[in-house]
Image: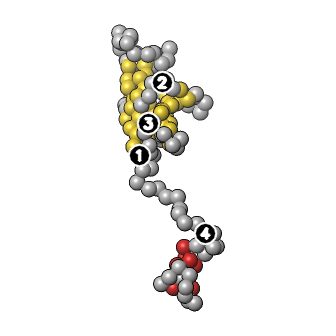
Amino acid sequence: MSWNNSSNASERLRDWLDPNNTGTLTLDGTGDNLLQVHIDGPYQIQTNQYYQFEAITDGGYQPYSWQWQLDYGNGSGPWQNVGGDSYTHISYNQQDFYLRVQVTDAQNDTKTSTIHPVTVSPGGAASQDTSLNEEEK
């Protein structure tokens, strides 16, 4: 077995690994450092209460940056920079929404999470925690 020194094609690696003689020496692959992100947080919340969602990020190259998308079902929710790998949300009305997060690593690779559906049900009185940013009114 050799790269190119056999008269039999079944014994030449070139015929199997580079049949078009492109000269390619490496191939892109998934590797061990594949950038990944998913959302950890509730799927059901109540109105007038604060909830935190976290972007669980793995792989890629640090530092990371995150953008969050809050979508009320029409597919046009804007991407927002809202403080990094966590997103705090309060719903003042009973409207379900979809949440996604997009992470970008130090090499400018980007990965977007799957959609995280959130169901909103009636809740109690408004939370008194004013230390958190209100995201929706």
Tell me if residue 42 comes above or below residue 124 in the rendering. Answer: below
Q: Nearer the viewer, mark 2 or mark 4?
A: 4
The residue where tag 3 is placed is 63
Question: Mark 1 or mark 4: which comes first in sequence?
Answer: 4
Real-space Cα separation, disc 3 to disc 2, in angstroms: 16 Å
Q: Position of residue 16 (x, y in %)?
A: 55, 77
1, 89: nearer the viewer: 1
Which mark is on residue 23?
4
For the residues marked 1 and 4, what is the alpha-carbon distance in whole angstroms? 30 Å
Residue 122 appears in the figure: no
Circle 1 or circle 3, nearest the eye: 3
Give whichever of 6, 99 is nearer the camera.
6
Q: Label 1, label 3: how many angstroms apart (C-alpha)?
A: 11 Å
Residue that carries the numbered disc 1 in the rendered image: 59
Q: What residue is shown at x 57% (from left), y 79% (from top)?
A: 15
Could you tell which of marks 3 and 2 lies nearer the N-terminus?
A: 3
Instruction: Tell me the element at label 4.
Output: loop
Q: Are marks 3 and 2 in contact (CB under 8 Å)?
A: no
| Residue neighbourhood size for the residue with mark 3, other residues' Cα within 10 Å, grouped as few (<14), some (14–19), many (≥20) | few
The answer to whether residue 103 is above or below residue 8 is: above
Residue type of the residue flagged with mark 2: Val
14 and 119: which is toward the camera: 14
